[in-house]
Each structure stands twice: as structure tokens, then as C-alpha cells.
Image: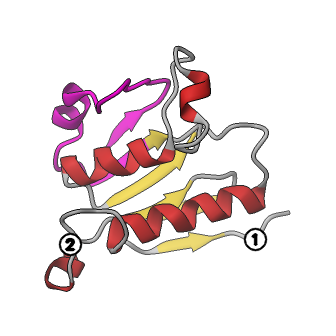
């Protein structure tokens, strides 16, 4: 397991993070901002969800939890971000994705209070209270 929080990659993903996370079973990576928001917060010490996905792709991670969400983002907003991450990690903007390697797809989930997970891609969601 690799946990990356309070990290600002800058213009490119930090190669030391890719090396640290390489082949981990699980990556927990902060995703404070959207790609559109990230430039406004340069120097604040945080990453965006697209950077978390890029780390997962380059480090060959199979299961990712994005965390450290912006407090101004509500549950609906974060569910949308989660869906965007999943699309990108499977077929979207990932340059290495294709039908031939779909079994190697990365599974991405947003972390939230009450989430329960187990080894592998199985995820169980506890209803919000």
C-alpha cells in the first residue's frame, strides 16, 4: 500500500512517487482539485484527480482511492469526479488502454467515511447515514 497525501507534483508527475508506488496493491492518493482548478492553487501543496490517475497508470497500480477532497466539493460533485477517474483509467484518455489490456485496468474509488473494501477490485459501499 502506498499513501500519497499533501503532495504537489508541479508540471510533471514526480518520478520518485512513481518509483515509490510501483506495483503496490493499493494507492491512496490525494485528489484535492480538478484539472481546471489546479492552476489556481499552485503552491498550495495539493494534487488533482487527473494526477492521481496518472500516478496509478505509470506505477501500474490496480486499485486506487482518491482522497483529501476539497471541502467545497459536495457528494454529487465527488461522485462525478469518481466517474471521470474510472472512465479515464479504463478507456478514456489513458494512452495505453485498449480492449486487449482491459483485464489490467485500474479500479478507482473515492474514499469517504464508511467505505469498506477488501483485497482485489471488490468494493462495498455502506449507505450514508
Q: Position of residue 123 (x, y in %)?
A: 50, 71
Relative placement, left or right, of 31 versus 97 is right
Relative placement, left or right, of 54 versus 29 is left
**Disc 1: CA contacts within 10 A as few (<14), some (14-19) or many (>=20):** few
Q: Position of residue 26 (x, y in %)?
A: 33, 52
Quadrant containing the N terminus in the rendered view: top left
Q: Which mark is residue 104?
A: 2
Say which element carries label 1: loop
Say which element carries label 2: helix
Q: Residue furthest bottom?
A: 99
Q: Position of residue 58 (x, y in %)?
A: 20, 48
Is 22 one of the magenta-colored residues? yes
Quadrant containing the C terminus in the rendered view: bottom right
Q: Quadrant of residue 91?
A: bottom left
Range covered by the magenta-colored residues: 1-28
Front residue of this view, candidates 126 and 55: 55
Is 90 one of the magenta-colored residues? no
The residue carrying mark 1 is 127
| Residue 105, placed above or below residue 44 | below
Q: Position of residue 121 (x, y in %)?
A: 37, 72
Q: Quadrant of residue 107?
A: bottom left
Residue at 52% across / 43% down in the picture? 35
Residue at 30% across / 44% down in the picture? 55
Amino acid at each position: 500500500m502506498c499513501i500519497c497525501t499533501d503532495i504537489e507534483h508541479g508540471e510533471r508527475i514526480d518520478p520518485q512517487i512513481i518509483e515509490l508506488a510501483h506495483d503496490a496493491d493499493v494507492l491512496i492518493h490525494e485528489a484535492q482539485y480538478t484539472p481546471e482548478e489546479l492552476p489556481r492553487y499552485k503552491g498550495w501543496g495539493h494534487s488533482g484527480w487527473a494526477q492521481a490517475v496518472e500516478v496509478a497508470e505509470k506505477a501500474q497500480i490496480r486499485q486506487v482511492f482518491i482522497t483529501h477532497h476539497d471541502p467545497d466539493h459536495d457528494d454529487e460533485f465527488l461522485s462525478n469526479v469518481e466517474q471521470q477517474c474510472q472512465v479515464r483509467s479504463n478507456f478514456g484518455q489513458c494512452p495505453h488502454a485498449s480492449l486487449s489490456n482491459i483485464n489490467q485496468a485500474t479500479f478507482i474509488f473515492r474514499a469517504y467515511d464508511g467505505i469498506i473494501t477488501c483485497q482485489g477490485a471488490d468494493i462495498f459501499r455502506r449507505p450514508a447515514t
